[in-house]
Image (cartoon, helix red, strand yellow):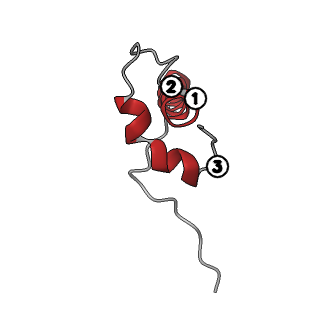
């Protein structure tokens, strides 16, 4: 006996604009994380001479292989 496949109801498809919005938001968050963990050096920080962000992510920076001193 052959059984036929019935697709599940309730599966939601995303439209192209919705997919583009999610992709843009994810890319923006990834670039911000990359900046704060990999590039922000305190002296050239977007927050001036404050080094709180640098010190906050210092260990994560070394763990991920980014040199910072």
Nearest to viewer (mark 2 / mark 1): 1
- Which residue corresponds to the image point at 51% horizontal and 37% vertical from the top-left? 37
Which quadrant is the N terminus positioned in? bottom right
Q: Residues within 10 Å of mark 1 (few under 14, many from 20)?
A: some
Q: Which disc number belongs to residue 25?
A: none
Q: Which residue is mark 1?
A: 39
Secondary structure beneath dot 2 equals: helix
Residue that appears at 59% across and 77% down: 3
Quick one: label 2 or label 3, which is nearer the N terminus?
Answer: 2
Q: In front of the other: label 2 or label 3?
A: 3
First reached walking from the N terminus: tag 3 or tag 1: 1
Percent position of residue 16, x then y = 56, 25
Query: Furthest-bottom residue in view?
Result: 1
The reply to whether the C-beta atoms of the residues labelled 2 and 3 are less than 8 Å apart is no
Number of residue marks: 3
- Residue 37 lies left or right of residue 67; in this view the side is left
| Label 2 CA crowd tier, 10 Å (few <14, some 14–19, many 20+) | few
Residue 44 in the image, given as x and y percentages of width and height: 52, 16
Disc 3 and disc 1: Cα gap in Å?
12 Å
Query: For the residue labelled by badge 3, is the local secondary structure a helix, a strand or a loop?
Result: loop
N-terminal-most mark, 2 or 1: 2
Q: CA distance from mark 2 to mark 1?
A: 15 Å
Q: Which quarter of the figure has residue 66? A: top right
> Crowdedness of circle 3 by 10 Å Cα count: few (<14), some, many (20+)?
few
Q: Which residue is mark 3?
A: 65
**In the rendered image, which residue does mark 2 sit on?**
28
- Secondary structure of the residue carrying numbered label 1: helix
Task: Quote the CA–CA distance across marks 2 and 3.
Answer: 22 Å
């Amino acid at each position: 006996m052959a059984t036929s496949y019935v697709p599940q109801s309730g599966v939601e498809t995303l439209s192209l604009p919705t997919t583009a919005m999610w992709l843009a938001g994810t890319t923006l968050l990834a670039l911000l994380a990359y900046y704060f963990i990999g590039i922000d050096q305190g002296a050239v920080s977007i927050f001036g001479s404050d080094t709180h962000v640098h010190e906050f992510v210092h260990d994560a920076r070394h763990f991920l292989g980014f040199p910072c001193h």
